[in-house]
Image (tube, rainbow, N blue to C red):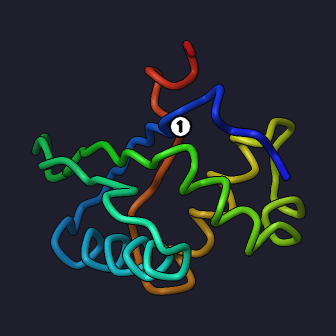
Amino acid sequence: MIDLTIIGTFILDFQTVDFEPDSKIAVDLLYGWQKTTQMENAFALDAPVQSAGWSFAKVFLAGLFVEKVYAIHEYDVNASKGKRFEDKFVAWLQKELQNRGCGAQIKMAPEMKSI
């Protein structure tokens, strides 16, 4: 298992042209995993900023939450694109969202890259 306590919070950029339905899909998915991992307040999606028809928001995932989700989906995460664990996890999460009909794009936020 990966020890993510050093990383702490995952910070992701959430970008979409259809915020309400896409954010609902994301929140429902994360809430389901939160229940499965028996955690509370493990994630947050902030209010979006609108620009040129796009909505931009931040998603915050607790490091322990990411670790527990990874433990459940380890094989699929490890099979995802990316060199570092964080890249693989974000690529896997993007695919999970797309498989549920979410059109949002997610990527590691610049704030997280500097950590």
User: Mark 1: few, some, or many residues within 10 Å (few <14, many ≥20)?
Assistant: some
**Type of amino acid at the residue the image marks with label 1:** Met
Which image quadrant for residue 6?
A: top right
Give how far across and how far down residue 56 sits, in percent: 24, 44
Q: Is residue 22 above or below residue 84?
A: below
Q: Is residue 44 above or below residue 111?
A: below
Residue at disc 1, secondary structure: strand
Give how far across and how far down residue 85 sits, in percent: 78, 42
The quadrant of the picture occupied by the C terminus is top right
Residue at position x 44%, y 85% in the image? 101
Which image quadrant for residue 111?
A: top left
Q: How many dots with numbers? A: 1
Tell which of 60 and 113 is nearer to you. Answer: 60
What residue is pinned by disc 1?
108
Question: Would you say 86 lies left or right of 30 here?
Answer: right
Question: Would you say 7 lies left or right of 28 here?
Answer: right
Q: Is residue 104 above or below residue 76?
A: above
Tell which of 115 and 42 is nearer to you. Answer: 42
Residue at position x 29%, y 72% in the image? 22
Question: Would you say 103 lies left or right of 65 here?
Answer: left
